[in-house]
Image (cartoon, grey):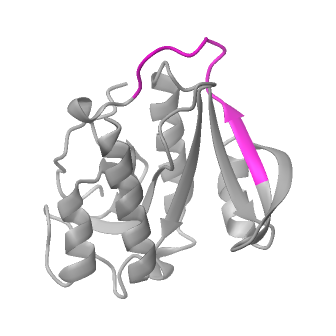
């Protein structure tokens, strides 16, 4: 699977981010950008968007583009992606968030399914990891629906007690590459409905 092609599952697709997407979300959210609009209230608070932007920039610096916008009906409904390139063991940790006004519609479940499909196509990825606060039942259901297994818990100073999750993507050994920036299509084609 080419990680550069927007991945569409049911009514949600994921589209690779570029820095101008974050500039738009942070500075000019009322306009249309790349044929997309934002929901009322935007995707998330400014500090979170800035944090995700920094993660995306760090990934691109390491020759990875693994941060995506969740798009449904021509609207960016959330963000998702890797926290880092695959480790030497082939593990990637993912994160995802849906705009408050667009939660409960299956967007995160479909976006995580698309991320897993990308990870399965990357020879350097053996497993996808995630963590959820113990009280975030909705996020736990997203992972369960996508076949993740609980593998432990840990305490986090900011987020409290977390459940750790894992899904294996391959039985093959780690190889030397994954979804590279030069392989990613940075365009989108409007509505997914």
Q: Which residues are magenta?
A: 164-178
Residue 116, quarter of picture? top right
Percent coordinates x, y for residue 46 in the rendering = 38, 81
Percent coordinates x, y for residue 71 in the rendering = 33, 60
Q: Quadrant of the C terminus?
A: bottom left
Marker count (numbered): 0
Q: What is the chief secondary structure element of the magenta stretch?
A: loop
Above or below, comparing residue 8 to residue 49 in the picture: above
In the picture provided, is 119 more to the left or to the right than 54?
Answer: right
Image point (20%, 81%), residue name:
27
Does any portion of residue 13 appear in the rendered image?
Answer: no
Percent coordinates x, y for residue 96 in the rendering = 52, 59
Residue 33, quarter of picture? bottom left
Image point (46%, 24%), residue name:
122
Let me know if residue 172 is in the magenta part: yes
Image point (27%, 78%), residue name:
26
Does any portion of residue 176 appear in the rendered image?
Answer: yes
Above or below, comparing residue 105 to residue 176 in the picture: below
In the picture provided, is 60 more to the left or to the right than 157?
Answer: left
Residue 140, quarter of picture? bottom right
Question: In the image as oriented, which residue stretches furthest toward the right?
Answer: 152
Percent coordinates x, y for residue 35 in the rendering = 14, 63
Let me know if residue 30 is in the magenta part: no
Closest to the observer, 68 or 156: 156
In the picture provided, is 78 more to the left or to the right than 93?
Answer: left
Q: Quadrant of the N terminus?
A: top left
Image point (45%, 74%), residue name:
48
Closest to the observer, 14 or 104: 14
Above or below, comparing residue 111 to residue 47 in the picture: above
């Amino acid at each position: 699977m080419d990680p550069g092609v927007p991945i569409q599952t049911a009514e949600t697709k994921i589209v690779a981010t570029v820095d101008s997407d974050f500039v738009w979300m942070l500075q000019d959210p009322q306009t249309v950008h790349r044929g997309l609009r934002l929901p009322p209230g935007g995707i998330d608070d400014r500090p979170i968007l800035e944090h995700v932007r920094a993660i995306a920039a760090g990934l691109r610096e390491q020759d990875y583009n693994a941060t995506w916008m969740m798009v449904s009906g021509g609207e960016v409904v959330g963000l998702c992606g890797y926290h880092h390139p695959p480790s030497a063991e082939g593990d990637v940790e993912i994160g995802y968030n849906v705009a408050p006004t667009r939660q409960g519609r299956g967007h995160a479940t479909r976006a995580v399914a698309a991320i897993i499909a990308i990870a399965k196509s990357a020879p350097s990825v053996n497993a996808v990891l995630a963590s959820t606060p113990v009280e975030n039942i909705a996020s736990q259901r997203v992972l369960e629906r996508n076949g993740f297994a609980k593998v432990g818990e840990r305490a986090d100073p900011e987020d409290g007690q977390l459940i750790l999750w894992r899904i294996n993507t391959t039985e093959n050994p780690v190889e030397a590459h994954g979804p590279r920036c030069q392989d990613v299509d940075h365009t989108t084609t409007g509505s997914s409905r």
